[in-house]
Amino acid sequence: MLVMILFAPIVLEKLRVPHIIGMIMAGLLVGEHGFNILARDSSFELFGKVGLYYIMFLAGLEMNMNDFKENKYKAMTLGLLCFFIPITIGFITNLSILHYSVATAVLLASMYASNTQVSYPIAIKYGISGQRGVSIAVGGTAVTDTLTLLVLAVVAGVHRGDTDGSYWILLVGRVIVIGTLIILLFPRIARWFFRRYDEVVTQYIFVLALVFLAAALMELAGMEGILGAFLTGLVLNRMIPHVSPLMGHLEFVGNALFIPYFLIGVGMLINLHVLFSSLNALIVAAVMIGVALTGKWIASFLVQKIFGLKSIERRLIYGLSTAQAAATLAAVMVGYNIILPDGSRLLNEDVLNGTILLILVTCIVSSLVTDHAARQIAINETQPDEHLHRSTEKILIPVAYLDTIDYLMELALMIRSTTFEDNILALHVMTDAGTEQSEMKGRLCLDKAAKAAAGANVRLVQLSRYDVNISSGIIHTAKEQDASCLVVGMHRKMNIMDSFYGKVTEGLLKSFHREVIVSKFLMPLSTIRRIVVAVPPKAEYEAGFQKWLRNVCRMGAVMGCRVHFFANEKTTGYIQSFLATKYKQTRTNFSLLEKWDDLLLLTGYVNYDHLLVIVSARRGSISYNPLFEELPKQIGTYFNNSSLMLVFPDQIGDEVKETITFSKPLGSNDVQLYEKIGAWLYKWLKKQ
């Protein structure tokens, strides 16, 4: 099995064939219907089921919840169309062409509508799992499969004699109760667990336990476990950030072991000998394949036209919505095992064999279409942006205490740009009086930081140096490496004579003019439910205004939480303008904060599981206010038990990009005049 999992993608990649097809074809070759090297025993059933649950769980976990909420009506429309169009066409063809009974025609038609996210790992591979088309396709799958499984439950219940009203009431009631239980209870349990246990292996086992528990509960309710796994992915989405080590472990184990097991197991079901030995089986298979592919294409085409999507998005949606395996196998096995009064089966062997070919063809078509569309979208999304500067995307993290490294790394991973590599640097500074013990501590700190970054598939640049004092070493390294941002921990007061910021941070603020983030976290960032941002007047005039605002928006997107801004009316207008052009999908609230002399107002909005972000400024900067000197006292009085970030924006730099709106169109002479004035003013300001 491991040899196949290793070499199938390597060999098929040479032929430019998606690795998923390689897994299925490998299963066909080694199975009992191929060279009979491996038997599809209970281990394949177990690991295959785990792999299927894993696919649905990752689909819910990887989904961009902001996109999903924005596209929920598109996803619901796709799900309904993917169900009703294939089932309608299938019902007509089953009666008129295949001449099946009404019950058989309904059950077989429902199989055309079902969908399994076999090609979803392709979206993960190309890094487009948060793309709009993926969210629509995955959400539509949940709707389609739910309706398909309901039809399956109805048909099975009728043939078992469960036709009384109590059966249907109990079925619907059980599904509602268990679904509500998962939605309401699982997030609370997970948040409590993550706050108390931060070891990644322990968290991984806990998450898998929740996934399989939800799947078992759904099966207990009379539905398929894939719905429980998908629902668990949705409710845990916000607590497992995409850049976290836990997410890296979940994807790694699933893609390396469980999902390939499932795909190979699907291939082992294919029996080409039986299929081609009967003409009737080929006719049934041809009808099934034609209806399934045509129905899904019509549904994807209609969704594109209704909502004005791009053609490449339509192809991506079609590719992700075409593959059939899990629900299709469940339906055909249920129908195959139902014995009618005349001794025949509800779904005969021709349908069973036709289903196997249907699975093979739809998986191949789905993989090819998805791979081509995903590759094209990935290329389009990674085009270099002329406005991005590599020099402004380096984050330096001084590390000195082992117990704060995970939090600092988690913050840096959230605010980093994924466009560039090697843009997170960890630094340990030793003074001239450094000893072997301090060197050992430095190595331990840097190794722990590297481990945290590696868990999120990010390469960390490790730096170590001697200097006369710590702040001097940090400043020199930041300038040498052209760091754009410093992420440091809050000063630990050793005695009553220590200042709030400490000598190191005060030295950084005086001599380093790029962005500095001073942070203190009382819980993992993934369990924080809201970000509250206090913005002072005139903050929009600082050079680093857009940079810190961009970082906060990135945090909100990764953490999946709402960002609540407190600022005066003018500053709020600038923030809203920036969000409207750059981060429309950020969930935000705005409240007025006219007076900066007392932050007592915020105590009613900042809970223990919120993150308070206070935007400050250095002495002498545009937005500096003498009231900032009272911040340490106010923080110690009101927010001592809250997670906190103090942001000191860039003082100098080229980050400011203002937008000027004119009341009438500009002529060419006007444009040239304003360009000259702007260039002269920029040079004059730079000299000042």
Image (cartoon, rainbow, N blue to C red):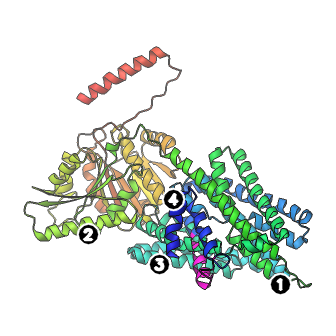
Number of numbered discs overlaid on the protein picture:
4
Amino acid type shown at disc 4: Lys
Residue at image coords 36%, 20%? 677
Indicate the position of residue 269 as horizontal and vertical percent values.
Answer: 68, 75
Disc assigned to residue 160: 1
Q: Which dot, 3 or 4, sits closer to the camera?
A: 4
Q: CA distance from mark 4 to mark 2?
A: 33 Å
**First along the sequence among labels 3 and 4:** 4
Q: Nearer the viewer, residue 417 or 684?
A: 417
Magenta residues (range): 35-54
Q: Residues within 10 Å of mark 3 (few under 14, many from 20)?
A: few
The residue carrying pointer 1 sits among few (fewer than 14), some (14 to 19) or many (20 or more) residues within 10 Å by Cα, namely few
Q: Tell which circle, 4 or 1, labels the residue nearer the N-terminal end.
A: 4
The residue under label 2 is which amino acid type?
Answer: Leu
Q: Earlier in the sequence, mark 1 or mark 2?
A: 1
Of the pair 169 and 572, the residue shown nearer to us: 169
- Return the residue at label 3: 205
Mark 2 element type: helix
- Residue 162 vertical position relative to residue 374 in the rendered view, above or below: below
Mark 3 falls on what kind of element? helix
Residue 139: horizontal and vertical position, in percent? Answer: 64, 60
Q: Position of residue 491 (x, y in %)?
A: 23, 61
- Are there few (<14), some (14-19), or many (20+) residues within 10 Å of tag 4? few
Q: Which residue is mark 2?
A: 402
